[in-house]
Amino acid sequence: MKSSVLVINCGSSSIKYALVPGAEGQPRLAGVAERVGSSDAFLKGIDSRGEHFEEILPGADHTRALEAIFEHLEGRRPDVVGHRIVHGGEHFTRAALINDDVVTAIDQTAALAPLHNSANLEGIAATRALFPDLPQVAVFDTAFHQSMPPRAFRYALPEALYRDHGIRRYGFHGTSHAFVSARADALSGIAGGWLTAHLGNGCSTCAVWEGRSLDTSMGLTPLEGLTMGTRSGDVDPGLHAHLARQLGWSLQRIDEVLNRGSGLLGLSGLTNDMRELEAAAQAGHENARLSIEVFCYRIAKSLAALSCALPRLDGIVFTGGIGENSALVRENVIGHLPHFGLVLDRNANTETVRGREGRIDSGHLAAPRLWVIPTDEEGRIAAETRQLLDETTP
Ligand code: AMP
């Protein structure tokens, strides 16, 4: 029987978890502890009967929140824990069995993602202390993109910045791009060339050829690339100096505005929630309409740019909260790419909703395929965790 995997995604104030069973047909248990470290910390999730629960955990730190998560596993003890780690730098090209050396290496890449990696390490430390006899595996968001060639991952900056400081493009959302492109291969019966668009609160595109990432829209940090919920995506690199010189903005303020006050939220002045933006645009809110227009145009532009990485384009895959749900966004993106010969089936597009896989092109043999594929990052992390465990267990 396959191992059951507890997938942990530990942030600075939240811990998402999913117990992915080894046996077919067993339900997945999943939930999230939020406001960890504060007086109003709580845990909510879904049990094996599909019912929702919520428990308040006043003052719970990461260790206490993890204990509470274990108490909600209904006695189902995992065989292994798989940790989602945001940044693996160049050190990790695939998942790794966690030991002291691996922890040190993750710590050494923390300069590239200070908030994320240190929170991930806190989760690892707490889980190892609580369950010292459980094997633990680190699965990296960046690892899938380590197959990018230098022409895609290097910035045109002085070589020493790369050599001495690791300044290059890394890419993120690797587990999602890996999952949906593998699924597109399986559904289409080919090892294809796919452009994948992960469109959620964070957004990125990826060019995947025969299961390998050849280029992606995010870079050194998850700020590069597409317009996102609250992140600006690409701006003129001269913007930072301009804001500092002309408006006297501090680095902290620039960082804050570009990461948390921009994107759909900044453009619309309303919200980062695409559902609300679609409703507001329909009701005549001009900036909501504009934010959707910019969002879709930037996605199309990114897909067109990434197509240069592929020897052949077999299709485009949409995923993430917006990619899986918004027929409007999909139609607008496809509308900006007439030269790709894409033929959208409008009925299939509007009928494909969250949780459902759907092919939304007309089925014309010469045209690239258009897929909507729900992402399953937990499932992919569990699969990579199992694979590594199988390889390392005699
Ligand atoms: P994620 O980060 O993948 O959970 O995606 C969050 C985004 O998906 C938010 O912008 C939501 O507004 C968007 N979303 C979820 N459901 C829908 C829907 N039915 N229509 C449009 N956008 C949606």
Image (tube, rainbow, N blue to C red):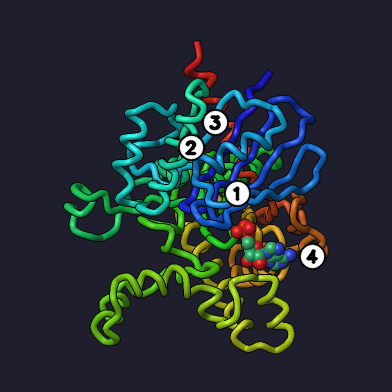
Element carrying mark 3: strand
* Residue at (41, 41) in percent of width and height: 121
Which is in the foreground here, disc 1 or disc 3?
Answer: 1
Indicate the amino acid at tag 2.
Val
Q: In the picture, residue 155 is in which quadrant? A: bottom left
Indicate the amino acid at tag 1.
Leu
* Quadrant location, the N terminus: top right
Cα–Cα span, label 1 and label 3: 23 Å
Cα–Cα span, label 3 and label 2: 10 Å
Residue 326, percent across and down? Answer: 70, 66
Indicate the amino acid at tag 4.
Thr
Q: Earlier in the sequence, mark 3 or mark 4?
A: 3
The reply to whether residue 74 is visible in this rendering is yes
- Dot 4 corresponds to which residue? 350
* Residue at (76, 27) in percent of width and height: 24
Q: Earlier in the sequence, mark 3 or mark 2?
A: 3
Cα–Cα span, label 1 and label 4: 41 Å
Element carrying mark 2: strand
Q: Earlier in the sequence, mark 2 or mark 1?
A: 1
Cα–Cα span, label 3 and label 4: 38 Å
Is mark 1 in CB contact (under 8 Å) with mark 3? no
Q: Residues within 10 Å of mark 3 (few under 14, many from 20)?
A: many
Which is in the foreground here, disc 4 or disc 2?
Answer: 2
Is mark 4 in CB contact (under 8 Å) with mark 2? no
Is mark 3 in CB contact (under 8 Å) with mark 4? no
Q: Earlier in the sequence, mark 4 or mark 2?
A: 2
- Dot 3 corresponds to which residue? 81
Which disc number belongs to residue 57? Answer: 1
